[in-house]
Amino acid sequence: MSDLKARIQGVRDTFNEALGHVEGLNALEELKNRYLGRKRGIVKELLTDLRSVPKELRPELGQAVNRLKQAVETALAEKFEALKSGEANSREGGIDLTLPGIAPELGALHPLNVVNRDLIRIFERMGYEVAGASEIETDFYNFEALGISKDHPARDMQDTFYISDDVVLRTHTSNVQIHLMENRKPPFKAIMPGRVYRKDADITHSPMFHQVEGLVVGEHVTFTDLKGTLEHFLKKLFGTQTKMRLRPSFFPFTEPSAEVDVSCIMCGGKGCRVCKNSGWLEILGAGMVDPVVFGNVGYDPETVSGFAFGLGVERVAMLKYGISDIRMFFDNDLRFLSQFN
Ligand code: PHE
């Protein structure tokens, strides 16, 4: 009965040919039914026809049909896998969980925020609270209460943005000192970070910049306390090898006043371009709160004493990161900003 044998081979050939043309899962399912269907499948038919074959030929032909059935099953299963992964990779298809993920882009802190946070953290660890006040301020809080009289040179129109005769954009964070003292009883220690405004613009000055001010008020607060506090702060900020020196200076609201220098953080004090060969960098203004200021906020200058200091955040950031142009902080160029992670 080589008749059946030939049919088996014929089925194998037509199946392979048909499988080659299958392009989708639906067509594959149809093909599977056509060949392996339980009732009218082509392979099933072969098995049925096997019954009418002479006994002695049955084992051989039976094995041949079984081999065909297995071959068809394997080929269908392989094609199924191939179509499935192909579909997953095509755009209309499902999701391919094996594809690499797309990592979200992380932002970076602005360098001024990095420095501002550092400054605040150092003082918080010394027990300072953080205080603030409005950037739009009256003449009284920005000037008058701080001993800056109407004819003081610091009021020059060159420096101050006036909103009206009596209202300004604050030129320093010292206005917070006054609000704080009006609302609080000593003793307290506070740090006051914030934006300030001056009519000034070049590579080291910006019309808007940031200051951090400090104020400590209590009984028996001395200049030695000021010195120790600043020395600790500057070593934390720039490193333990940092040296500090005070030079006599003047601020209308402190007496005595000092300009505070640190040993140059670029050359360590040997002298370089950044410190103009002096070995020192000016970093802070400071002094003992003027008794007149205490009088202005209703404190008794006979029992209360205190110190204050202020520094520019941009200046610290420029020194720390070696940035030569203050405008880079405000250009929002991502190539610059993404370097401060
Ligand atoms: N307010 C001063 C300035 O802007 C800095 C300063 C603050 C000085 C506190 C002494 C005490 O220049």
Image (cartoon, grey):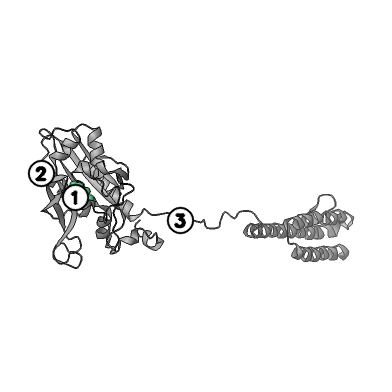
Mark 1 or mark 3: whose residue is earlier in sequence: 3
Left or right: 278 in relation to 77: left
Q: Quadrant of the N terminus?
A: bottom right
Residue 73 place in picture, x, y as percent:
73, 56
According to the image, label 3 marks what residue?
105
Measuring from the top left, give residue 256's x and y in whole percent.
10, 46
- What residue appears at the point 30 percent right and 58 percent down from the top-left corner? 206
Does residue 18 lie above or below 294 as drawn?
A: below
Closer to the eye: label 3 or 2: 2
What amino acid does circle 3 point to?
A: Glu
Q: SS of the residue at dot 3?
A: loop
For label 2, being within 8 Å of ligand 1 is answered no
Crowd class of label 2 (few under 14; some 14 to 19; many from 20; radius 10 Å) = some
Mark closest to the chain's N terminus, 3 or 2: 3
Give percent across and percent down for residue 172.
26, 48
Label 3 neighbour load within 10 Å: few <14, some 14-19, many 20+:
few
Give the Cα distance between marks 3 and 2: 49 Å
Q: Residue at x 66, y 60 (%)?
A: 82
Q: Amino acid at mark 1?
A: His
Tell me if 316 is positioned left or right of 39 in this view.
left
Query: Disc 1 on helix, strand or loop?
Result: loop
Asked whether 236 or 23 is in front, the reply is 236
Cβ of mark 3 under 8 Å from ligand 1: the answer is no
Q: Which mark is residue 311?
A: none
Q: Amino acid at mark 2?
A: Phe
Describe the element under mark 2 as helix, strand or loop.
helix
Foreground tag (1 vs 3):
1
Residue corresponding to mark 2? 223
The crowding category of the residue bearing disc 1, from other C-alpha atoms within 10 Å (few below 14, some 14 to 19, many at least 20), is few
Residue 319 appears in the picture as rendered: yes
CB atoms at circles 2 and 1 under 8 Å apart?
no
* Marker disc for residue 152: 1
